[in-house]
């Protein structure tokens, strides 16, 4: 998969392109992307136009300011690659935020990305101040003989799947609902850093992964999880929070990897959240903490077996 991080130096032939921020690559996003990937059957290059943002009105659409991201950029790209996308255009938002809708379609989508087909969600807006809709896009693109596939929302529990709904579920610890709308498990791929090494003293050595700035942090608590690194998959128990019994300077994901021995410092294993087990709590002693972790391990083993046999 080829990625362009600016609007310069792009040389891609006719594309079937999906438009959107795609911050969660959820089922609704996948429907739009899959429509673009179908263009390969007509000799077109499956492509995605998305963009990077900051946390201020100057660097992000007003409706996106302060939105916590669901997947890190590398996981987002990994998901797009898995879906069959061949080219990703991923410039910063400020590089095109001032364009009128007409300029955006003429100069960027048609002129720069060489779109021959366009796919977008039913609620897609674009141009300066998000002035134009998916219906406007259909009319504008028609002037260049380019069809637009407006994809309706994917429904889950009688409402369209959305990143907003997924964020709410994650913040409430409803990981099952979040994963159902994502169409895959919620994932983290953050560096393993040294901790206080208390876990190994109570027979449960753990790895610690900090959250990236701007990354959504799920509800504090204990989760049944699994980790992928190399070609292996390991069941795990993960505490997300500030470890109230022993203390932590900032929120992190601390995971005991069941059946694993080794050093993962400096690596980036992928942590998958499967089910919420219990809220984070402060115990009266380290021994009480050890016993609670032992119970969590058995619960996580049962969850892992349910999913993977």
Image: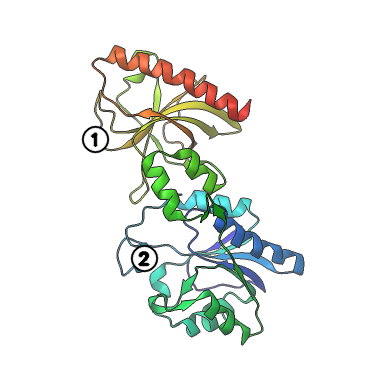
Q: How many residues crowd mark 1 within 10 Å: few (<14), some (14–19), many (20+)?
A: few
Q: Residue at x 48, y 31 (%)?
A: 225
Q: Say which label, 2 or 1, has the lower sequence index.
A: 2
Q: Is residue 117 left or right of residue 290?
A: right
- 186 lies above or below 247: below
Locate residue 117: give its quadrant.
bottom right
Q: Which residue is mark 2?
A: 63
For the residues labelled 2 and 1, say whether their Cβ atoms are less than 8 Å apart. Answer: no
User: Please, is residue 51 above or below residue 212 in the view?
Assistant: below
Real-space Cα separation, disc 2 to disc 1, in angstroms: 31 Å
Judged left or right of residue 297, residue 113 is: right
Horizontal and vertical percent for residue 109? 56, 76
User: Quick one: quadrant of the C terminus?
Assistant: top right
Disc 1 element = loop
Q: Residue furthest front?
A: 158
Snapshot quadrant of residue 10? bottom right
- Foreground pick, 232 / 247: 247
Place of residue 95 in the rendered image (x, y in percent of width and height, measured from the top left)? 41, 73
The residue that disc 1 covers is 249
Q: Residue at x 50, y 59 (%)?
A: 22
């Amino acid at each position: 998969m080829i990625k362009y991080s600016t609007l310069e130096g792009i040389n891609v032939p006719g594309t079937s392109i999906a438009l959107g921020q795609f911050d969660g690559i959820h089922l609704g996003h996948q429907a739009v992307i899959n429509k673009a990937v179908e263009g390969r059957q007509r000799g077109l290059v499956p492509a995605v136009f998305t963009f990077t943002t900051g946390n201020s009105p100057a660097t992000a659409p007003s409706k996106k300011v302060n939105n916590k991201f669901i997947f890190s950029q590398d996981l987002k790209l990994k998901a797009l690659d898995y879906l069959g996308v061949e080219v990703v255009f991923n410039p910063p938002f400020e590089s095109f935020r001032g364009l009128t809708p007409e300029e955006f379609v003429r100069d960027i989508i048609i002129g720069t990305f060489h779109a021959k087909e366009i796919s977008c969600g039913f609620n897609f807006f674009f141009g300066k101040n998000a002035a134009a809709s998916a219906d406007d896009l259909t009319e504008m693109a028609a002037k260049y003989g380019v069809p637009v596939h407006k994809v309706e929302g994917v429904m889950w529990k009688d409402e369209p799947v959305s990143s907003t709904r997924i964020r709410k579920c994650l913040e409430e610890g409803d990981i099952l609902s979040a994963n159902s709308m994502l169409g895959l498990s919620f994932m983290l791929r953050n560096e393993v850093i040294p901790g206080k090494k208390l876990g190994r003293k109570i027979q449960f050595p753990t790895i610690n992964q900090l959250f990236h700035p701007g990354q959504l942090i799920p509800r504090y608590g204990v989760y049944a999880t699994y980790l992928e690194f190399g070609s292996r998959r390991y069941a795990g128990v993960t505490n997300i929070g500030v470890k109230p019994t022993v203390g932590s300077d900032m929120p992190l994901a601390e995971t005991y990897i069941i059946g694993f021995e080794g050093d993962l410092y400096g690596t980036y294993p992928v942590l998958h959240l499967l089910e919420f087990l219990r809220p984070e709590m402060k115990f009266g002693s380290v021994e009480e903490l050890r016993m609670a972790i032992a119970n969590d391990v058995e619960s996580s083993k049962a969850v892992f077996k349910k999913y993977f046999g």
